[in-house]
Image (cartoon, rainbow, N blue to C red):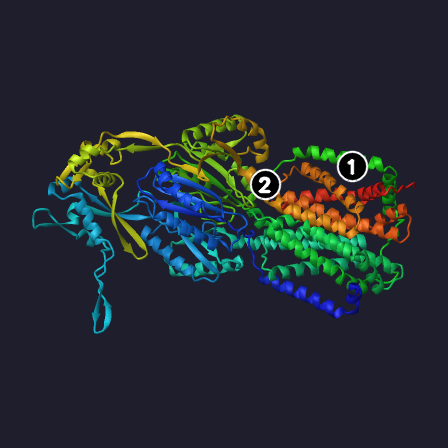
């Protein structure tokens, strides 16, 4: 059956197909999910374990090591990294790339089981390991709650109400509240009053612990029914705590808590995090949407709910958006849809100009139907509209019209020769359908490396491959069905057709040029080879990159104070910086995070782990173009804010990756050796002069006060190590006695020494000398023993407070960023040799990280799929011709495409990033596709009996307009992407490469055909 004849004879069926695509595509546009970026699974979980009082080394040896041994037995494990800090172990578990989101819950269950089994062997005092498997969840709707006129307790209650209401909103999966001020009930106790009354501190501890715990009285059988017996619950009011009674030892008298302690509600000494928004204390509300839900609709529901909630709350409460993914997605998708409309319009106008209005309408209509059909199929296959999928549609725009142009051109020429529409369509479709299908599959196969890549980058870009696959296959189907039908409506036999005489000016000039190159084919081939060699030689001059900065008008200021710096000092520095930033006219808003990073509000942001000396300012500008000039002078201004601290600036990034652009890791057993290696690497980076923001992740050593417990004297005095430890904690930042509940919030009750009672009136309670005045209760002697009798002396020591490990080996990472105006690859090239010349002791390793590693891993994952893609392309090219020389011609031309790519990137000063690599691969598909159709035409004309030389020229001339138009429409269709930072380098790669690839198709292919078949052209 001839497809074209069927289409013309049964127009109702074809029109039904058209209506399905047009109406279905229109419906799909209103229903399809919308996202900012495509979802990719962050295959990471964290295992966090508390071990209060332990040093970082103890945590590493007694917790981290034991848990890592258990976790590393998981066959799904890809990488294991950890940070051991005083009192806490944080292990990051990364799963192998080929596991998808559907399998992760089962993997995390196995992780919990292994961690739970290992927890039984952890030392006494270690907490229960917590497995956090939602580390990669994204909260795309991110708000700041400010209420400066209300107390911390009131703000907590407001946040609780808002969270509760938001969780009832359609499409909302989770709401995280962060930045809530943590408060505690402090019992300031005079130790000398206790001593005078003969009350031991352990007696006070027991009093609180006995009254602040869950109570139950069991059950009783009453008339055949089991009835619970209630016991009065723990006290939950300050006055009730004050009225707790303690019997004095050796008497019948009692004393109330208020007689020995002063109770107050105070902020905890260490806050998990402190958040400011535009200079005011704030709480953040991070809203996550359900999977596969239109984020724009969810954002609309959430905004409406917030407006409703605010009406029921007191005045003075504000909820401001920090990052509204719904609004960003809505604007981005609308902008991309406009780009697609512009591309369709530009392509249609171009076709009208070069092929006449009839062909322009025919091919333009087929293009519109293809686009709408693609949207419909995307909806049906659960593909969302987002940056990558919409960009893929624009990229495919020129390729989508190629099949239709070939059919329309051939049908138009046959009808001009007097053939009927049915005969003309049947002839051209039968002649070209299989070469076009093969060429289309080759075009798809060029992108298959993305579809088959199993890493995060491949997952991030999968929709690019999927949309190309759907749209190109659909374009072939519509080219051999709808194009003949529309051609029968618009084309007329022998009239009203544009001038096609191949003796006109353009064709004559092309034929002269082609004849000249055919007559001097050795020289032509030599020149092409020379140009190609020069291009490859100059490829090293092209800047290398990975993913470009985002076009979001946001940048980050990271601040690191000296390791061990108090969070209140960190807040002071951040407050001074934010006030200066807020005063700048170009700044829209500033949200500051002290003690930790922000929530993961976008997939490409990686939150910083908790650290009191860390601060983050998230600065939103009015316009993205203001960022570059604004941050140019910012480092000098920031340097004066804290001469002992460090500030680092970071732009938001597209795609996976993030963090420092340059990184080198040293691994080995000894911490001091690792620090020495890191110091040598840092020295090399500083000597470079351009590289900036140089640091390493172990940071400075911390200070520790060693109380040096005297086992012998303490034993004689009847004081245990626990008594000694409790007394020190009580005299420093406080000893927790219990907790009381206030609704959902739990108040710790902390006993602290009454500072006014210290013998040293100038003491602060935190000075080393004040420790000597501590009194420790002896249970055996029933009296207080001076601290100095129980200690061999107080010493100040340094210690590692951040011990990083990678795959169970201690690892230190030196990080930096390239200088202004250069890429990470350029900076790395300058220092790589010197860093690799650092002498490594036996048992130590060096690895490169940063963008170099991310890019290498992405390209490696892409490379695993490329061989199959190229095999498919090679196989189809051989099967189409069933001979060797034709495919050989095609594959000899392919490497020459680099000439246009290198020229385009050098002229525009664009980097060759990961997206450029994809564009380069797609260029191969376009070039091969055009070459196949041309060689097939040459073979057919020779088979029909034409002189071989004439057949080469005639076939090449017949392909002049289709090839040129396909190139022009692709180039013009991609023009809008030049203004999109994510696709700009890819667009330049394809546009520049396609210009030269067109020349290769029309000149190099005929010349190589003539050379391999030894066909001489004399005139």
Residue 450 at x, y percent in the picture: 62, 49
Does residue 754 sit above or below 955 in this rendering? above
Mark 1 surroundings: few (<14), some (14-19) or many (≥20) residues within 10 A: some
Q: In the rendered image, is residue 623 in sight?
A: yes
Q: How many marks?
A: 2
Q: Nearer the viewer, residue 825 or 670?
A: 670
Query: In the image, is 28 to the left or to the right of 238?
Result: right
Q: If you read the primary sequence from the N terminus, does the residue marked by circle 1 or circle 2 appear first?
A: 1
Q: In the rendered image, is residue 584 in sight?
A: no
Mark pair 1, 2: CA separation: 30 Å
Which element carries disc 1, helix, strand or loop? helix
Mark 2 surroundings: few (<14), some (14-19) or many (≥20) residues within 10 A: many
Residue 378 at x, y percent in the picture: 62, 59
Residue 876 at x, y percent in the picture: 73, 51
Query: Residue at the location (48% across, 41% down)?
Result: 556
Q: Image quadrant for the N terminus?
A: bottom right
Query: In the image, is 85 to the left or to the right of 216?
Result: right
Does residue 512 sit above or below 220 in this rendering? above
Q: Nearer the viewer, residue 322 or 890?
A: 890
Query: Residue at the location (87% across, 44% down)?
Result: 511
Which residue is most to the left?
Answer: 251
The answer to which quarter of the image holds residue 66 is top left
Q: Nearer the viewer, residue 774 or 523?
A: 523
Query: In the image, is 956 to the left or to the right of 91?
Result: right
Q: Residue 546, labelled with which disc?
A: 2
Does residue 717 sit above or below 415 in this rendering? above
The answer to which quarter of the image holds residue 907 is top right
Please give the residue where the numbered disc 1 appears in the rendered image: 528
Query: Residue at the location (70% across, 50% down)?
Result: 872
Which element carries disc 2, helix, strand or loop? loop
Q: Residue 819, labelled with which disc?
A: none
Residue 289 at x, y percent in the picture: 48, 57
């Amino acid at each position: 059956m001839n497809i074209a004849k069927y289409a013309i004879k049964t127009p109702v069926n074809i029109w039904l197909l058209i209506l399905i695509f047009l109406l279905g595509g229109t419906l799909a546009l209103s229903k399809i999910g919308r996202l900012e970026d495509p979802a990719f699974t962050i295959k990471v979980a964290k295992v966090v374990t508390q071990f209060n009082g332990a040093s970082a080394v103890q945590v590493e040896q007694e917790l981290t090591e034991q848990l890592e041994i258990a976790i590393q037995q998981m066959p799904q494990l890809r990488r294991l990294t950890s940070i051991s800090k005083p009192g806490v172990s944080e292990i990051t578990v990364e799963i192998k790339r080929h596991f998808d989101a559907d399998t992760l819950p089962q993997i995390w269950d196995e992780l919990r089981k292994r961690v739970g089994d290992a927890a039984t062997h952890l030392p006494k005092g270690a907490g229960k390991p917590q497995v956090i498997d939602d580390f990669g969840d994204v909260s795309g709707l991110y708000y700041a709650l400010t209420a400066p006129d209300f107390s911390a307790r009131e703000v907590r209650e407001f946040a609780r109400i808002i969270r509760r209401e938001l969780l009832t909103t359609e499409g909302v999966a989770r709401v995280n509240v962060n930045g809530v001020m943590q408060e505690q009930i402090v019992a300031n106790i005079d130790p000398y009053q206790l001593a005078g009354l003969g009350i031991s501190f352990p007696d006070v501890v027991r009093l609180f612990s006995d009254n602040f715990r869950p109570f139950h009285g069991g059950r009783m059988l009453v008339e055949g029914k089991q009835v619970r017996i209630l016991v009065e619950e723990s006290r939950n009011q300050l006055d009730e705590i004050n009225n707790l009674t303690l019997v004095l030892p050796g008497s019948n008298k009692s004393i109330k808590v208020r007689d020995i302690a002063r109770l107050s509600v105070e902020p905890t000494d260490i806050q998990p995090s402190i958040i400011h928004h535009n200079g005011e204390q704030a709480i953040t509300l991070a809203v996550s949407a359900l999977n596969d839900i239109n984020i724009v609709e969810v954002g609309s529901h959430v905004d409406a709910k917030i407006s409703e909630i605010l009406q029921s709350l007191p005045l003075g409460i504000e909820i401001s958006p920090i990052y509204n993914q719904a609004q960003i997605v809505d604007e981005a998708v609308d902008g991309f849809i406009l780009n697609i409309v512009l591309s369709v319009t530009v392509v249609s106008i171009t076709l009208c100009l070069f092929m006449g209005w009839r062909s322009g309408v025919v091919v333009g209509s087929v293009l519109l139907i293809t686009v709408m059909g693609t949207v419909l199929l995307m909806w049906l296959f659960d593909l969302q509209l987002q940056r990558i999928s919409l960009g893929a549609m624009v990229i495919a725009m020129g390729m989508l019209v190629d099949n239709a142009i070939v059919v329309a051109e051939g049908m138009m020429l046959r009808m001009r020769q007097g053939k009927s529409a049915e005969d003309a369509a049947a002839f051209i479709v039968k002649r070209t359908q299989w070469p076009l299908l093969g060429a289309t599959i080759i075009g798809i196969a060029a992108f298959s490396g993305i579809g088959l890549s199993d890493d995060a980058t491949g997952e991030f870009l999968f929709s690019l491959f999927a949309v190309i696959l759907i749209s190109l296959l659909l374009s072939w189907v519509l080219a051999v069905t709808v194009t003949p039908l529309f051609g029968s409506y618009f084309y007329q036999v022998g009239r009203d057709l544009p001038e096609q005489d191949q003796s006109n000016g353009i064709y004559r000039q092309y034929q002269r040029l082609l004849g000249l190159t055919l007559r001097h084919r050795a020289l032509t081939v030599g020149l092409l080879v020379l140009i190609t060699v020069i291009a490859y030689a100059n490829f090293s001059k092209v800047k290398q990159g990975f993913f470009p900065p985002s076009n979001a008008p946001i940048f980050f200021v990271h601040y690191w104070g000296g390791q061990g710096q108090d969070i209140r000092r960190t807040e002071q520095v951040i407050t001074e910086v934010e006030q200066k930033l807020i005063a700048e006219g170009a700044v829209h808003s500033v949200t500051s995070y002290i003690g930790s990073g922000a929530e993961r509000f976008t997939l490409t942001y990686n939150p910083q782990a908790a650290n009191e000396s860390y601060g983050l300012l998230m600065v939103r500008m009015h316009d993205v173009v203001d960022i570059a000039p604004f941050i140019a002078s910012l480092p000098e201004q920031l340097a004066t804010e804290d001469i002992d601290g460090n500030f680092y600036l970071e732009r938001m990034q597209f795609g996976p990756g993030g963090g420092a652009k340059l990184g080198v890791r040293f691994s080995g057993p000894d911490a001091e050796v690792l620090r020495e290696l890191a110091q040598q690497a840092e020295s090399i980076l500083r000597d470079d002069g351009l590289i900036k923001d140089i640091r390493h992740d172990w940071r400075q050593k911390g200070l520790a006060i060693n109380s040096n417990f005297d086992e012998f004297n303490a034993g004689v005095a009847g004081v245990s190590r626990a008594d000694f430890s409790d007394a020190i904690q009580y005299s420093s930042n406080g000893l927790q006695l219990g907790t009381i509940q206030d609704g959902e919030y739990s108040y710790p009750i902390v006993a602290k020494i009454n500072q006014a009672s210290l013998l040293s009136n100038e003491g602060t309670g935190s000075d080393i000398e004040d420790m000597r005045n501590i009194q420790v209760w002896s249970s055996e002697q029933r009296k207080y023993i001076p601290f100095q009798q129980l200690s061999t002396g107080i010493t100040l020591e340094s210690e590692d407070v951040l011990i990083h490990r990678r795959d169970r080996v201690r690892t230190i990472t030196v990080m930096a960023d390239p200088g202004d105006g250069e890429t990470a690859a350029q900076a790395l090239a300058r220092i790589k040799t010197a860093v690799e010349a650092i002498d490594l002791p036996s048992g130590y390793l060096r690895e490169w990280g940063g963008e170099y590693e991310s890019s290498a891993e992405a390209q490696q994952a892409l490379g695993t799929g490329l061989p199959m893609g190229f095999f498919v392309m090679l196989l189809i090219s051989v099967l189409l011709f069933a001979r060797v020389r034709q495919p050989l011609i095609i594959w000899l031309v392919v490497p020459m495409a680099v000439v246009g790519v290198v020229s385009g990137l050098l002229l525009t000063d664009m980097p060759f990033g990961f997206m450029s690599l994809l564009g380069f691969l797609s260029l191969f598909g376009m070039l091969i596709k055009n070459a196949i159709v041309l060689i097939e035409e040459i073979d057919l004309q020779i088979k029909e009996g034409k002189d071989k030389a004439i057949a080469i020229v005639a076939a090449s001339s017949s392909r002049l307009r289709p090839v040129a138009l396909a190139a022009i429409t692709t180039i013009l269709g991609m023009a809008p992407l030049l203004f999109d930072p994510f696709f700009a380098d890819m667009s330049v790669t394809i546009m520049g490469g396609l210009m030269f690839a067109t020349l290769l198709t029309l000149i190099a292919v005929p010349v190589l055909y003539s050379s391999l078949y030894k066909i001489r052209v004399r005139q």
